[in-house]
Protein backbone atom coordinates (compact mmCIF):
# COMPACT_ATOMS: atom_id res chain seq x y z
CA UNK A 1 0.00 0.00 0.00
CA UNK A 2 1.26 3.45 -0.78
CA UNK A 3 1.75 5.55 2.33
CA UNK A 4 0.41 9.06 2.18
CA UNK A 5 0.24 11.85 4.70
CA UNK A 6 -1.64 15.10 4.35
CA UNK A 7 -1.30 17.98 6.74
CA UNK A 8 -3.54 20.99 6.83
CA UNK A 9 -3.23 24.41 8.36
CA UNK A 10 -5.84 27.15 8.44
CA UNK A 11 -4.65 28.48 5.13
CA UNK A 12 -3.03 25.67 3.24
CA UNK A 13 -3.29 21.96 2.79
CA UNK A 14 -0.07 20.12 2.16
CA UNK A 15 0.28 16.61 0.91
CA UNK A 16 3.25 14.29 1.06
CA UNK A 17 3.22 10.84 -0.48
CA UNK A 18 5.88 8.31 0.38
CA UNK A 19 6.92 5.51 -1.97
CA UNK A 20 5.92 7.73 -4.83
CA UNK A 21 7.89 9.82 -7.26
CA UNK A 22 5.35 12.61 -6.96
CA UNK A 23 6.47 13.89 -3.59
CA UNK A 24 9.45 13.59 -1.23
CA UNK A 25 9.16 11.27 1.80
CA UNK A 26 6.72 12.44 4.45
CA UNK A 27 9.02 11.86 7.38
CA UNK A 28 9.98 15.53 7.70
CA UNK A 29 7.91 17.78 9.89
CA UNK A 30 7.14 21.33 8.78
CA UNK A 31 9.37 23.97 10.33
CA UNK A 32 7.87 26.48 12.72
CA UNK A 33 5.38 28.79 11.07
CA UNK A 34 6.38 32.41 11.62
CA UNK A 35 3.80 34.21 13.66
CA UNK A 36 2.76 30.92 15.12
CA UNK A 37 4.67 28.64 17.49
CA UNK A 38 7.91 26.75 17.64
CA UNK A 39 7.72 23.10 16.63
CA UNK A 40 8.92 20.66 19.29
CA UNK A 41 9.54 16.97 18.67
CA UNK A 42 6.73 15.18 20.48
CA UNK A 43 8.64 11.91 20.34
CA UNK A 44 11.47 13.44 22.33
CA UNK A 45 9.04 14.82 24.86
CA UNK A 46 7.29 11.54 25.28
CA UNK A 47 10.55 9.73 25.93
CA UNK A 48 10.90 11.92 29.00
CA UNK A 49 7.46 11.10 30.26
CA UNK A 50 7.71 7.44 31.12
CA UNK A 51 6.56 7.95 34.68
CA UNK A 52 6.29 4.24 35.31
CA UNK A 53 10.00 4.07 34.58
CA UNK A 54 10.53 6.74 37.24
CA UNK A 55 11.47 9.85 35.26
CA UNK A 56 12.40 12.77 37.47
CA UNK A 57 9.67 15.33 38.05
CA UNK A 58 11.91 18.17 36.90
CA UNK A 59 12.51 16.57 33.52
CA UNK A 60 8.80 16.04 33.31
CA UNK A 61 7.95 19.67 33.99
CA UNK A 62 10.65 20.72 31.52
CA UNK A 63 8.78 18.70 28.93
CA UNK A 64 5.53 20.44 29.84
CA UNK A 65 7.31 23.76 29.30
CA UNK A 66 8.79 22.61 26.03
CA UNK A 67 5.34 21.62 24.82
CA UNK A 68 4.14 25.14 25.51
CA UNK A 69 6.67 27.24 23.63
CA UNK A 70 6.60 30.98 23.60
CA UNK A 71 5.15 32.88 20.71
CA UNK A 72 7.71 33.91 18.11
CA UNK A 73 7.83 37.09 16.07
CA UNK A 74 6.07 37.06 12.72
CA UNK A 75 8.74 39.13 10.96
CA UNK A 76 11.04 36.53 9.48
CA UNK A 77 9.57 34.07 7.02
CA UNK A 78 12.36 31.55 7.41
CA UNK A 79 14.21 29.92 4.55
CA UNK A 80 13.44 26.62 6.21
CA UNK A 81 9.73 27.18 5.91
CA UNK A 82 9.96 28.33 2.30
CA UNK A 83 11.95 25.30 1.35
CA UNK A 84 9.57 23.00 3.26
CA UNK A 85 6.61 24.45 1.35
CA UNK A 86 8.37 23.92 -1.98
CA UNK A 87 8.81 20.24 -1.17
CA UNK A 88 5.39 19.80 0.43
CA UNK A 89 3.03 21.64 -1.90
CA UNK A 90 -0.62 22.29 -1.20
CA UNK A 91 -2.84 19.31 -1.92
CA UNK A 92 -5.34 21.72 -3.43
CA UNK A 93 -2.77 22.70 -6.08
CA UNK A 94 -1.88 19.08 -6.78
CA UNK A 95 -5.35 17.62 -6.90
CA UNK A 96 -5.05 16.12 -10.39
CA UNK A 97 -1.71 14.49 -9.60
CA UNK A 98 -3.14 13.04 -6.40
CA UNK A 99 -6.15 11.65 -8.24
CA UNK A 100 -3.84 10.06 -10.82
CA UNK A 101 -1.63 8.62 -8.10
CA UNK A 102 -4.60 7.01 -6.39
CA UNK A 103 -5.27 5.07 -9.62
CA UNK A 104 -8.93 4.50 -8.91
CA UNK A 105 -8.39 3.19 -5.38
CA UNK A 106 -10.71 4.26 -2.59
CA UNK A 107 -9.39 7.37 -0.84
CA UNK A 108 -10.27 7.61 2.85
CA UNK A 109 -10.19 10.94 4.68
CA UNK A 110 -8.95 11.10 8.27
CA UNK A 111 -9.41 14.35 10.14
CA UNK A 112 -8.08 15.44 13.48
CA UNK A 113 -10.50 17.57 15.51
CA UNK A 114 -8.83 19.98 17.94
CA UNK A 115 -6.70 22.56 16.18
CA UNK A 116 -7.75 21.19 12.78
CA UNK A 117 -11.52 21.38 12.50
CA UNK A 118 -11.83 23.69 15.50
CA UNK A 119 -9.55 26.39 16.85
CA UNK A 120 -7.51 25.72 19.97
CA UNK A 121 -9.28 27.45 22.86
CA UNK A 122 -8.76 27.71 26.61
CA UNK A 123 -11.88 25.76 27.54
CA UNK A 124 -11.95 22.30 25.93
CA UNK A 125 -15.74 22.20 26.33
CA UNK A 126 -16.01 25.18 24.01
CA UNK A 127 -13.90 24.02 21.08
CA UNK A 128 -16.74 24.53 18.65
CA UNK A 129 -16.49 23.98 14.95
CA UNK A 130 -17.77 26.67 12.60
CA UNK A 131 -20.81 26.17 10.38
CA UNK A 132 -18.60 26.64 7.34
CA UNK A 133 -16.23 23.91 8.51
CA UNK A 134 -19.16 21.56 9.18
CA UNK A 135 -20.50 22.18 5.67
CA UNK A 136 -17.07 21.47 4.20
CA UNK A 137 -16.72 18.19 6.10
CA UNK A 138 -20.27 17.19 5.09
CA UNK A 139 -19.38 17.84 1.46
CA UNK A 140 -16.12 15.89 1.80
CA UNK A 141 -18.00 12.89 3.20
CA UNK A 142 -20.19 12.84 0.10
CA UNK A 143 -17.14 11.89 -1.95
CA UNK A 144 -14.91 9.92 0.42
CA UNK A 145 -15.42 7.79 3.51
CA UNK A 146 -14.44 10.26 6.22
CA UNK A 147 -13.30 9.61 9.78
CA UNK A 148 -12.53 11.94 12.64
CA UNK A 149 -9.72 10.63 14.83
CA UNK A 150 -9.32 12.32 18.17
CA UNK A 151 -7.93 11.99 21.66
CA UNK A 152 -11.31 13.02 22.96
CA UNK A 153 -14.23 10.85 23.96
CA UNK A 154 -16.15 9.82 20.82
CA UNK A 155 -19.49 11.17 22.06
CA UNK A 156 -17.94 14.54 22.76
CA UNK A 157 -16.46 14.81 19.28
CA UNK A 158 -19.81 13.80 17.83
CA UNK A 159 -21.57 16.48 19.88
CA UNK A 160 -19.30 19.07 18.27
CA UNK A 161 -19.39 17.73 14.72
CA UNK A 162 -22.96 16.41 14.48
CA UNK A 163 -22.53 14.60 11.17
CA UNK A 164 -24.07 11.12 11.37
CA UNK A 165 -22.53 9.96 8.11
CA UNK A 166 -18.95 10.04 9.43
CA UNK A 167 -16.75 7.46 11.16
CA UNK A 168 -15.52 8.51 14.60
CA UNK A 169 -12.44 7.20 16.38
CA UNK A 170 -12.37 8.72 19.87
CA UNK A 171 -10.11 8.14 22.90
CA UNK A 172 -6.95 8.18 20.75
CA UNK A 173 -8.43 5.59 18.40
CA UNK A 174 -9.61 3.22 21.17
CA UNK A 175 -13.29 3.79 20.43
CA UNK A 176 -14.23 3.44 16.78
CA UNK A 177 -17.74 3.59 15.43
CA UNK A 178 -19.15 3.79 11.96
CA UNK A 179 -22.29 5.62 10.84
CA UNK A 180 -25.28 4.28 12.79
CA UNK A 181 -27.30 3.83 9.62
CA UNK A 182 -24.44 1.94 7.98
CA UNK A 183 -22.31 3.30 5.20
CA UNK A 184 -22.32 3.14 1.45
CA UNK A 185 -18.57 2.48 1.67
CA UNK A 186 -18.45 -0.34 4.21
CA UNK A 187 -18.14 -3.93 3.06
CA UNK A 188 -21.02 -5.86 4.63
CA UNK A 189 -24.15 -4.50 6.23
CA UNK A 190 -23.20 -4.49 9.93
CA UNK A 191 -22.45 -1.23 11.65
CA UNK A 192 -18.81 -0.87 12.65
CA UNK A 193 -17.70 -0.83 16.31
CA UNK A 194 -14.22 -1.42 17.72
CA UNK A 195 -13.28 -0.86 21.38
CA UNK A 196 -10.02 -2.67 22.08
CA UNK A 197 -9.56 -1.18 25.58
CA UNK A 198 -12.92 -2.18 27.10
CA UNK A 199 -11.37 -3.98 30.07
CA UNK A 200 -9.77 -0.67 31.16
CA UNK A 201 -13.06 1.21 31.50
CA UNK A 202 -13.52 0.75 35.29
CA UNK A 203 -9.86 1.61 35.93
CA UNK A 204 -9.93 4.73 33.77
CA UNK A 205 -13.15 5.86 35.40
CA UNK A 206 -11.61 5.41 38.85
CA UNK A 207 -8.53 7.40 37.87
CA UNK A 208 -10.71 10.13 36.36
CA UNK A 209 -12.61 10.53 39.65
CA UNK A 210 -9.39 10.59 41.68
CA UNK A 211 -7.75 13.14 39.41
CA UNK A 212 -10.88 15.28 39.47
CA UNK A 213 -10.55 15.53 43.25
CA UNK A 214 -6.79 16.00 43.21
CA UNK A 215 -6.84 18.75 40.57
CA UNK A 216 -9.27 20.85 42.61
CA UNK A 217 -6.30 22.30 44.49
CA UNK A 218 -4.78 23.69 41.28
CA UNK A 219 -6.55 26.80 39.97
CA UNK A 220 -7.16 26.53 36.22
CA UNK A 221 -6.57 22.77 35.99
CA UNK A 222 -9.28 20.86 34.19
CA UNK A 223 -9.78 17.11 34.12
CA UNK A 224 -11.60 15.71 31.12
CA UNK A 225 -13.15 12.26 30.96
CA UNK A 226 -12.37 10.83 27.54
CA UNK A 227 -13.92 7.43 28.35
CA UNK A 228 -10.92 5.18 27.60
CA UNK A 229 -8.46 7.87 28.67
CA UNK A 230 -8.28 10.99 30.81
CA UNK A 231 -6.89 14.44 30.06
CA UNK A 232 -5.50 16.81 32.66
CA UNK A 233 -5.37 20.26 31.08
CA UNK A 234 -2.82 22.81 32.28
CA UNK A 235 -3.36 25.51 29.61
CA UNK A 236 -4.95 27.79 32.20
CA UNK A 237 -2.71 26.86 35.10
CA UNK A 238 -0.06 29.30 36.32
CA UNK A 239 3.32 27.90 35.27
CA UNK A 240 4.50 28.11 38.87
CA UNK A 241 1.95 25.43 39.74
CA UNK A 242 2.90 23.00 36.99
CA UNK A 243 5.41 21.07 39.11
CA UNK A 244 2.87 20.51 41.84
CA UNK A 245 0.19 19.40 39.39
CA UNK A 246 2.58 17.08 37.57
CA UNK A 247 3.67 15.59 40.88
CA UNK A 248 0.07 15.00 41.90
CA UNK A 249 -0.78 13.23 38.67
CA UNK A 250 2.37 11.17 38.92
CA UNK A 251 1.54 10.13 42.47
CA UNK A 252 -1.95 8.98 41.45
CA UNK A 253 -0.61 7.00 38.51
CA UNK A 254 1.93 5.12 40.65
CA UNK A 255 -1.01 2.99 41.72
CA UNK A 256 -1.89 2.18 38.11
CA UNK A 257 1.04 0.59 36.29
CA UNK A 258 -1.28 -0.44 33.47
CA UNK A 259 -1.88 3.19 32.57
CA UNK A 260 0.66 5.44 30.91
CA UNK A 261 1.12 9.15 30.60
CA UNK A 262 1.76 11.13 27.45
CA UNK A 263 1.96 14.83 26.76
CA UNK A 264 -0.22 16.76 24.33
CA UNK A 265 -0.73 20.44 23.73
CA UNK A 266 -0.78 21.75 27.29
CA UNK A 267 -2.46 18.57 28.39
CA UNK A 268 -1.35 15.45 30.27
CA UNK A 269 -3.00 12.40 28.77
CA UNK A 270 -3.52 9.18 30.72
CA UNK A 271 -4.30 6.05 28.73
CA UNK A 272 -4.11 2.26 28.82
CA UNK A 273 -0.80 0.62 27.97
CA UNK A 274 -2.29 -1.49 25.19
CA UNK A 275 -0.62 -1.50 21.80
CA UNK A 276 -3.30 0.56 20.17
CA UNK A 277 -3.20 4.17 19.05
CA UNK A 278 -4.48 6.49 16.32
CA UNK A 279 -2.23 4.71 13.81
CA UNK A 280 -3.84 1.36 14.61
CA UNK A 281 -7.26 2.97 14.32
CA UNK A 282 -6.33 4.23 10.85
CA UNK A 283 -5.21 0.77 9.83
CA UNK A 284 -8.39 -0.76 11.18
CA UNK A 285 -10.59 1.69 9.29
CA UNK A 286 -8.55 1.34 6.13
CA UNK A 287 -8.99 -2.39 6.20
CA UNK A 288 -12.72 -2.00 6.35
CA UNK A 289 -13.00 1.00 4.04
CA UNK A 290 -10.36 1.46 1.42
CA UNK A 291 -6.75 1.78 0.54
CA UNK A 292 -5.44 5.34 0.30
CA UNK A 293 -5.32 7.28 3.59
CA UNK A 294 -5.33 11.07 3.69
CA UNK A 295 -4.63 12.32 7.19
CA UNK A 296 -5.50 15.95 7.91
CA UNK A 297 -4.03 17.24 11.10
CA UNK A 298 -2.85 20.48 12.63
CA UNK A 299 0.14 21.77 10.65
CA UNK A 300 1.98 22.93 13.69
CA UNK A 301 1.06 20.83 16.68
CA UNK A 302 2.84 22.79 19.36
CA UNK A 303 0.04 25.28 19.97
O1 LIG B 1 -5.04 13.89 19.99
P1 LIG B 1 -5.98 15.04 19.78
O2 LIG B 1 -7.19 14.65 19.03
O3 LIG B 1 -5.31 16.24 19.18
O4 LIG B 1 -6.50 15.39 21.23
C1 LIG B 1 -5.63 16.01 22.15
C2 LIG B 1 -6.43 16.77 23.18
O5 LIG B 1 -7.32 17.64 22.43
C3 LIG B 1 -8.13 18.48 23.26
O6 LIG B 1 -7.29 19.40 23.93
C4 LIG B 1 -6.68 20.37 23.09
O7 LIG B 1 -7.69 21.27 22.62
C5 LIG B 1 -8.32 22.06 23.67
C6 LIG B 1 -9.42 22.89 23.03
O8 LIG B 1 -8.93 23.73 22.03
C7 LIG B 1 -7.26 22.90 24.38
O9 LIG B 1 -7.86 23.65 25.44
C8 LIG B 1 -6.17 21.98 24.95
O10 LIG B 1 -5.15 22.74 25.54
C9 LIG B 1 -5.59 21.11 23.83
O11 LIG B 1 -4.68 20.16 24.38
C10 LIG B 1 -8.94 17.65 24.22
O12 LIG B 1 -9.67 18.50 25.08
C11 LIG B 1 -8.06 16.69 25.03
O13 LIG B 1 -8.87 15.84 25.80
C12 LIG B 1 -7.24 15.85 24.08
O14 LIG B 1 -6.37 15.03 24.85
Image (spheres, rainbow, N blue to C red):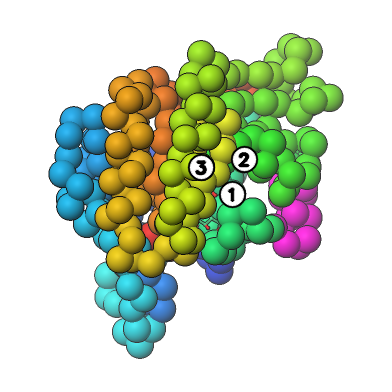
State the residue in front, 135 or 277: 277
Marks 3 and 1, Cα distance to the nearest angstrom? Answer: 24 Å
The disc at residue 169 is none
* Residue marked by disc 3: 212
- Label 1 beta carbon less than 8 Å to ligand 1: yes
Quickly name the residue at label 2.
148
Q: Looking at the image, do the residues carrying marks 2 and 1 touch, with CB atoms under 8 Å apart?
A: yes
Q: Say whether residue 273 is left or right of residue 99.
A: left
Residue 43 locus on image (x, y percent): 27, 44
Q: Residue at point 20% right, 43% down? A: 48
**Which is more N-terminal, label 1 or label 2?**
1
Q: Is residue 80 above or below residue 301?
A: below
| Most common secondary structure along the magenta stretch | helix
Q: Is residue 168 left or right of residue 41?
A: right
Q: Is residue 39 visible?
A: no
- Give the percent coordinates (x, y) of residue 256: 35, 24
Task: From the viewer's perspective, tell me whether residue 140 is left or right of residue 260.
Answer: right
Amino acid sequence: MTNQNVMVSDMAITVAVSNSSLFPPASQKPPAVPGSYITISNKKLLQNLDINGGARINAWVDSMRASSPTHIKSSALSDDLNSWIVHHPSALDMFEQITNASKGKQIVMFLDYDGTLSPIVDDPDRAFMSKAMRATVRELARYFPTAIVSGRCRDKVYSFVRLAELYYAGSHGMDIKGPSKGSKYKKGAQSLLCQPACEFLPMVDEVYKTLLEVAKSTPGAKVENNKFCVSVHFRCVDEKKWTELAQQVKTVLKEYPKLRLTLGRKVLEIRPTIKWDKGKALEFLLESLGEIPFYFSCWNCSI
